[in-house]
Image (spheres, grey):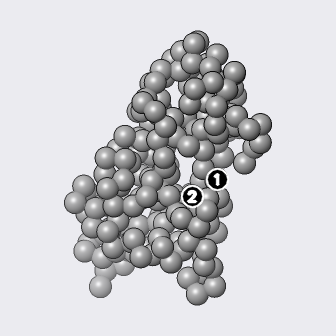
Amino acid sequence: MSKIEIPECLPYPKITTIQDTPELRNKFCYVVKAYSQQGIIMLVVRQAGEVCIRMFDFDAKMLDLEKDKGCLPQIVEQSPKIVKLMNLIGIPKALLYFSDDSGTPRLVDVRLSLNKFVGPGFLGDFFGKIVPIQERIGDPLVLSDEVMEMISKCEGVFSQDVIVKPSAFKTIIRKEEMVPLYGVHYASGASN
């Protein structure tokens, strides 16, 4: 049995508001239903025919499978399908972020490296076939001046709490930290 090199788990990055993320302007983006920025991270490493899976909370604190419950059993149950898919599409290691809104875990992001997440389209096309994923709202759109006006007036798809993610994944630097170019809009005025 070979020794698997386990990478460090990275916490789920905090998402800033669309208004505080001007880099989103004029980007082609998906709009998804806002989700809790709390949940479970599943670290999967495939190496030399071996597989290692570890579970963490969104702050990257390792979970105890015996003590920590919540939606953890549902994610553990899905793990064989996830590992098989990763093998089929050639992903050797990844962090899978499952938001836990109402006891049903939803896969909201897959991180391949420090500065690379899969795009929302890839997430839906591949992982969406085997596990519940983030809920897309409407068709992808460009965050033009007109759309930004809709956001400020909470109109159309922006009449509800949403997260905007560019179709092609990008990162930005915030407070000397590399984070995904995502923006959240709370039509309700609440924050997560």
Amino acid type of disc 1? Gln
SS category of the residue bearing label 2: strand
Q: Which residue is mark 2?
A: 99
Residue 160 appears left or right of 8: right
Amino acid type of disc 2? Ser
Quarter-wise, where is residue 179 in the image?
top right
Residue 15 appears left or right of 33: right
Q: Between 70 and 19, which is closer to the camera in this rendering?
A: 70
| Image vertical order of residue 70 relative to residue 167, above or below | below
Quarter-wise, where is residue 159 in the image?
top right
How many numbered badges does the structure rendering display?
2
Q: Between 191 and 187, which is closer to the camera in this rendering?
A: 187
Residue 32 at x, y = what percent?
52, 40
Q: Are marks 1 and 2 in contact (CB under 8 Å)?
A: yes
Residue 189 at x, y = what percent?
77, 37
Residue drawn at (30%, 76%), measured in percent from left and top?
50
Mark 1 neighbour density, 10 Å: few (under 14) some (14–19) many (20 or more): some
Counting residues from the start of the chain, the first of labels 1 and 2 encountered is 1
Residue 84 at x, y = what percent?
27, 67
SS category of the residue bearing label 1: loop
Between the C-alphas of marks 1 and 2, the distance is 6 Å
**Which quadrant of the figure contains the N terminus?**
bottom left
Residue 52 appears left or right of 54: left
Residue drawn at (39%, 71%), measured in percent from left and top?
78
| Image vertical order of residue 44 relative to residue 112, above or below | below
Residue 139 at x, y = what percent?
42, 30
| Image vertical order of residue 169 relative to residue 2, above or below | above
Q: Which residue is mark 1?
A: 37
